């Protein structure tokens, strides 16, 4: 299983970005997909999860600003990030659980700075 993340970049505070994670297998066969992030000097943390039934969970710091969604036809999971803050700066990774194995994408850098 391969996960291909994209969409990162440099954005000013208050701006928006949309991350994408394309899967090499049918996304319907992946029970849970998520976005994680790792800032310099910090541990990787969970940002958002979405199940194959569409239920979602978010870390408190992004609630109301980030939205995770999935497009089954495109085998892609998205993370829409609005009202970005400097503390959102990190490498963002997508993750998926497939047949009891965990798979990671390569990471995409998000930098929020003026």
Image (cartoon, helix red, strand yellow):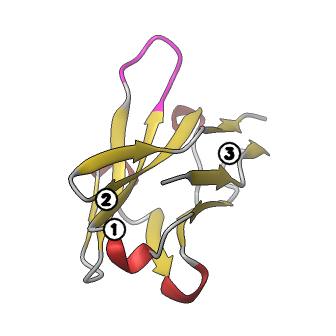
Magenta region: which residues? 38-43
Question: As drawn, which residue projects farthest toward the bottom?
Answer: 73
Q: Position of residue 39 (x, y in %)?
A: 50, 24
Q: Is residue 11 visible in the rendered structure shown here?
A: no
Q: Secondary structure at mark 3?
A: loop
Task: State which mark lies toward you, 1 or 3.
Answer: 1
Q: CA distance from mark 2 to mark 3?
A: 35 Å
| Residue 33 magenta-highlighted | no
Residue 66 relative to residue 61: left or right: right
| N-term-proximal mark, 1 vs 2 | 1
Identify the residue at horizontal 45%, vertical 69% (top origin): 67
Confirm or deny contact between disc 1 and disc 2 (CB under 8 A): yes
Q: Nearer the viewer, residue 70 or 100?
A: 100
- Please name the residue that numbered disc 1 is placed on: 30
Identify the residue at horizontal 58%, vertical 57% (top origin): 83
Please say if 69 is above or below 109.
Answer: below
Question: As drawn, which residue projects farthest toward the top?
Answer: 41
Which quarter of the figure is the C terminus placed in?
A: top right
Q: Nearer the viewer, residue 69 or 62?
A: 69
Residue 47 relative to residue 78: left or right: left
Confirm or deny contact between disc 1 and disc 3 (CB under 8 A): no
Q: Residues within 10 Å of mark 1 (few under 14, many from 20)?
A: many
Q: Residues within 10 Å of mark 2 (few under 14, many from 20)?
A: some
Q: CA distance from mark 1 to mark 2?
A: 5 Å
Q: Position of residue 30 (x, y in %)?
A: 34, 68
In the rendering, which numbered label is found on residue 98? 2
Question: As drawn, which residue projects farthest toward the left?
Answer: 100
- Please name the residue that numbered disc 3 is placed on: 13
Q: Position of residue 105 (x, y in %)?
A: 54, 44
| N-term-proximal mark, 2 vs 3 | 3
Q: Residues within 10 Å of mark 3 (few under 14, many from 20)?
A: some
């Amino acid at each position: 299983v391969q996960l291909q993340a994209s969409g990162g970049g440099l954005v000013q505070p208050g701006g928006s970005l949309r991350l994408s994670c394309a899967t090499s297998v049918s996304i319907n066969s992946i029970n849970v997909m998520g976005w994680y992030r790792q800032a310099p000097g910090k541990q990787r943390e969970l940002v958002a999860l979405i199940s194959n039934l569409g239920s979602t969970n978010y870390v408190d710091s992004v609630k109301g600003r980030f939205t995770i969604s999935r497009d089954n036809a495109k085998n892609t999971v998205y993370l829409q990030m609005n009202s970005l803050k400097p503390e959102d700066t990190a490498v963002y990774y997508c993750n998926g659980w497939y047949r009891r194995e965990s798979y990671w994408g390569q990471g995409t850098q998000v930098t929020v700075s003026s």
